[in-house]
Amino acid sequence: MKKNLRHKIANFVFLNEFRNKVTKSNVIPFDQATTIGILYDSSNEAHYEIVRKYVKELREIHHKDVLALGYYDQKELPTLRFSKLGLDFFTLKDLNWFYKPISGIVRRFVDREFDILIDLHLGNQIPFKYVAASSNAKFKIGKYSKNSERYYNFMLSINEQIQLPAFIEQVNHYLKQIKNEKSK
Protein backbone atom coordinates (compact mmCIF):
# COMPACT_ATOMS: atom_id res chain seq x y z
CA MET A 1 0.00 0.00 0.00
CA LYS A 2 2.75 2.44 0.97
CA LYS A 3 4.69 1.72 -2.25
CA ASN A 4 1.52 2.14 -4.34
CA LEU A 5 0.88 5.55 -2.74
CA ARG A 6 4.49 6.54 -3.44
CA HIS A 7 4.06 5.56 -7.11
CA LYS A 8 0.87 7.62 -7.38
CA ILE A 9 2.54 10.65 -5.82
CA ALA A 10 5.63 10.21 -8.01
CA ASN A 11 3.51 9.94 -11.15
CA PHE A 12 1.60 13.08 -10.14
CA VAL A 13 4.90 14.95 -9.60
CA PHE A 14 6.20 13.75 -12.98
CA LEU A 15 3.04 14.79 -14.83
CA ASN A 16 3.08 18.16 -13.09
CA GLU A 17 6.75 18.75 -13.93
CA PHE A 18 6.32 17.90 -17.61
CA ARG A 19 2.76 19.13 -18.06
CA ASN A 20 3.77 21.75 -20.64
CA LYS A 21 6.58 19.80 -22.29
CA VAL A 22 5.98 18.96 -25.93
CA THR A 23 8.66 17.31 -28.04
CA LYS A 24 9.35 19.22 -31.24
CA SER A 25 8.57 17.33 -34.40
CA ASN A 26 11.95 16.57 -35.92
CA VAL A 27 12.27 13.55 -38.19
CA ILE A 28 15.74 12.06 -38.48
CA PRO A 29 15.89 9.15 -40.95
CA PHE A 30 17.90 6.17 -39.74
CA ASP A 31 20.33 6.36 -42.65
CA GLN A 32 21.15 10.01 -41.79
CA ALA A 33 21.47 9.48 -38.03
CA THR A 34 24.98 9.29 -36.63
CA THR A 35 24.22 9.16 -32.88
CA ILE A 36 21.71 6.89 -31.18
CA GLY A 37 20.72 6.67 -27.53
CA ILE A 38 19.05 3.54 -26.24
CA LEU A 39 17.08 3.43 -23.02
CA TYR A 40 16.18 0.00 -21.62
CA ASP A 41 15.37 -2.08 -18.56
CA SER A 42 18.53 -3.93 -17.55
CA SER A 43 16.91 -5.62 -14.52
CA ASN A 44 16.34 -8.66 -16.73
CA GLU A 45 19.62 -10.40 -17.66
CA ALA A 46 18.17 -11.56 -21.00
CA HIS A 47 17.20 -7.97 -21.89
CA TYR A 48 20.70 -6.80 -21.05
CA GLU A 49 22.20 -9.38 -23.43
CA ILE A 50 19.70 -8.57 -26.20
CA VAL A 51 20.45 -4.84 -25.96
CA ARG A 52 24.21 -5.47 -25.79
CA LYS A 53 23.98 -7.39 -29.08
CA TYR A 54 21.72 -4.70 -30.58
CA VAL A 55 24.24 -1.99 -29.68
CA LYS A 56 27.00 -4.06 -31.27
CA GLU A 57 24.90 -4.46 -34.45
CA LEU A 58 24.18 -0.74 -34.66
CA ARG A 59 27.86 0.07 -34.24
CA GLU A 60 29.43 -2.56 -36.48
CA ILE A 61 26.87 -3.02 -39.24
CA HIS A 62 25.23 0.41 -39.39
CA HIS A 63 28.26 2.45 -38.20
CA LYS A 64 26.32 4.43 -35.58
CA ASP A 65 27.72 6.05 -32.44
CA VAL A 66 25.56 4.38 -29.78
CA LEU A 67 25.17 4.96 -26.05
CA ALA A 68 22.84 2.69 -24.08
CA LEU A 69 21.47 3.53 -20.64
CA GLY A 70 20.00 0.68 -18.63
CA TYR A 71 17.96 0.95 -15.47
CA TYR A 72 18.52 -1.77 -12.89
CA ASP A 73 15.64 -1.86 -10.41
CA GLN A 74 17.77 -2.57 -7.32
CA LYS A 75 20.15 -0.47 -5.24
CA GLU A 76 23.28 -2.15 -6.63
CA LEU A 77 24.22 -3.70 -9.97
CA PRO A 78 24.98 -7.43 -9.97
CA THR A 79 28.68 -8.16 -9.44
CA LEU A 80 29.30 -9.17 -13.05
CA ARG A 81 27.52 -6.15 -14.51
CA PHE A 82 29.34 -2.85 -14.73
CA SER A 83 29.44 0.15 -17.01
CA LYS A 84 31.46 -0.40 -20.17
CA LEU A 85 32.19 1.88 -23.05
CA GLY A 86 28.76 2.90 -24.33
CA LEU A 87 26.76 0.78 -21.87
CA ASP A 88 25.90 2.75 -18.74
CA PHE A 89 23.52 2.01 -15.88
CA PHE A 90 21.55 3.69 -13.16
CA THR A 91 19.91 2.03 -10.17
CA LEU A 92 17.41 2.73 -7.40
CA LYS A 93 20.08 4.59 -5.45
CA ASP A 94 20.30 7.05 -8.38
CA LEU A 95 16.65 8.10 -7.92
CA ASN A 96 15.07 10.56 -5.53
CA TRP A 97 11.96 9.72 -3.50
CA PHE A 98 9.76 10.52 -6.54
CA TYR A 99 11.72 8.05 -8.73
CA LYS A 100 13.33 10.91 -10.62
CA PRO A 101 16.87 10.03 -11.78
CA ILE A 102 19.44 12.35 -10.16
CA SER A 103 22.79 10.78 -11.14
CA GLY A 104 25.46 12.35 -13.33
CA ILE A 105 25.30 9.39 -15.72
CA VAL A 106 21.62 10.05 -16.41
CA ARG A 107 22.18 13.81 -16.65
CA ARG A 108 24.91 13.32 -19.29
CA PHE A 109 22.67 10.91 -21.24
CA VAL A 110 19.69 13.30 -21.15
CA ASP A 111 21.82 16.31 -22.12
CA ARG A 112 23.35 14.60 -25.14
CA GLU A 113 21.74 15.58 -28.45
CA PHE A 114 21.27 12.16 -29.99
CA ASP A 115 19.90 12.08 -33.51
CA ILE A 116 17.60 9.26 -32.35
CA LEU A 117 16.54 8.06 -28.90
CA ILE A 118 15.14 4.54 -28.86
CA ASP A 119 13.23 3.74 -25.68
CA LEU A 120 13.09 -0.06 -25.47
CA HIS A 121 11.38 -0.09 -22.09
CA LEU A 122 8.18 -2.08 -22.41
CA GLY A 123 6.69 -1.17 -19.03
CA ASN A 124 5.45 2.02 -17.45
CA GLN A 125 8.08 2.83 -14.82
CA ILE A 126 8.55 6.45 -13.81
CA PRO A 127 12.38 6.61 -14.15
CA PHE A 128 12.06 5.83 -17.87
CA LYS A 129 9.43 8.52 -18.29
CA TYR A 130 11.78 11.10 -16.76
CA VAL A 131 14.68 10.14 -19.02
CA ALA A 132 12.59 10.08 -22.21
CA ALA A 133 10.75 13.32 -21.42
CA SER A 134 13.97 15.13 -20.43
CA SER A 135 16.10 13.88 -23.31
CA ASN A 136 17.54 16.38 -25.79
CA ALA A 137 17.37 13.79 -28.57
CA LYS A 138 16.16 15.17 -31.90
CA PHE A 139 13.90 12.20 -32.69
CA LYS A 140 12.41 9.96 -29.99
CA ILE A 141 10.79 6.58 -30.56
CA GLY A 142 9.13 4.35 -27.97
CA LYS A 143 6.18 2.22 -26.96
CA TYR A 144 2.76 3.87 -27.30
CA SER A 145 1.16 5.19 -24.14
CA LYS A 146 -1.58 7.81 -24.21
CA ASN A 147 0.05 9.64 -21.31
CA SER A 148 3.41 9.83 -23.14
CA GLU A 149 2.32 11.15 -26.54
CA ARG A 150 3.90 14.56 -26.01
CA TYR A 151 7.36 13.15 -25.18
CA TYR A 152 7.94 11.09 -28.33
CA ASN A 153 8.02 11.85 -32.04
CA PHE A 154 7.03 8.31 -33.00
CA MET A 155 5.31 5.65 -30.92
CA LEU A 156 4.60 2.00 -31.63
CA SER A 157 1.31 0.53 -30.47
CA ILE A 158 2.17 -3.01 -29.47
CA ASN A 159 0.57 -6.07 -27.98
CA GLU A 160 1.16 -6.19 -24.20
CA GLN A 161 2.67 -9.68 -24.53
CA ILE A 162 5.35 -8.60 -27.03
CA GLN A 163 8.90 -9.61 -26.14
CA LEU A 164 11.92 -7.33 -26.48
CA PRO A 165 13.39 -8.96 -29.64
CA ALA A 166 10.08 -8.52 -31.49
CA PHE A 167 9.83 -4.90 -30.30
CA ILE A 168 13.36 -4.21 -31.57
CA GLU A 169 12.38 -5.71 -34.93
CA GLN A 170 9.38 -3.37 -35.09
CA VAL A 171 11.53 -0.37 -34.15
CA ASN A 172 14.08 -1.25 -36.83
CA HIS A 173 11.37 -1.78 -39.44
CA TYR A 174 9.78 1.62 -38.86
CA LEU A 175 13.06 3.50 -38.42
CA LYS A 176 14.18 2.30 -41.84
CA GLN A 177 10.84 3.39 -43.39
CA ILE A 178 11.01 6.95 -42.08
CA LYS A 179 12.13 9.59 -44.56
CA ASN A 180 12.24 13.37 -44.42
CA GLU A 181 12.14 15.93 -47.20
CA LYS A 182 15.92 15.81 -47.71
CA SER A 183 16.06 12.03 -48.11
CA LYS A 184 13.19 11.68 -50.62
Image (tube, rainbow, N blue to C red):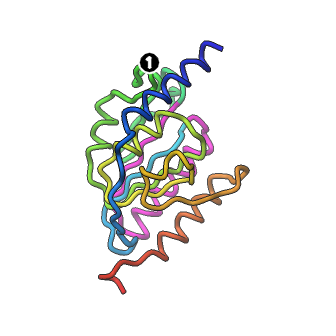
Q: Which residue corresponds to mark 1?
A: 97
Residue 73, image x, y percentages: 54, 28
Query: Which one is in front, 80 or 51?
Result: 51
Picture coordinates of residue 154, whole percent (x, y): 47, 61
Question: Which quadrant does the C terminus fall into?
Answer: bottom left
Inspect the image, locate mark 1, and give the three-letter code of the amino acid beneath it: Trp
State the residue in front, 26 or 172.
26
Q: Residues within 10 Å of mark 1 (few under 14, many from 20)?
A: few
Magenta stretch in the rendered image: 43-72
Q: x and y percent of residue 126 in the render?
A: 50, 33
Residue 178: in magenta span: no
Q: Position of residue 172 (x, y in %)?
A: 52, 67
Residue sitting at 32 percent across and 61 percent down? Answer: 115
Please tell me whether residue 60 belongs to the stretch shown in magenta.
yes
Which residue occupies the extreme top position in the image? 2
Secondary structure beneath disc 1? loop
Q: Quadrant of residue 46?
A: top right
In the shown orientation, is residue 130 left or right of residue 156? left
Is residue 113 shown left or right of residue 80?
left
The residue shown at (60%, 39%) is: 45
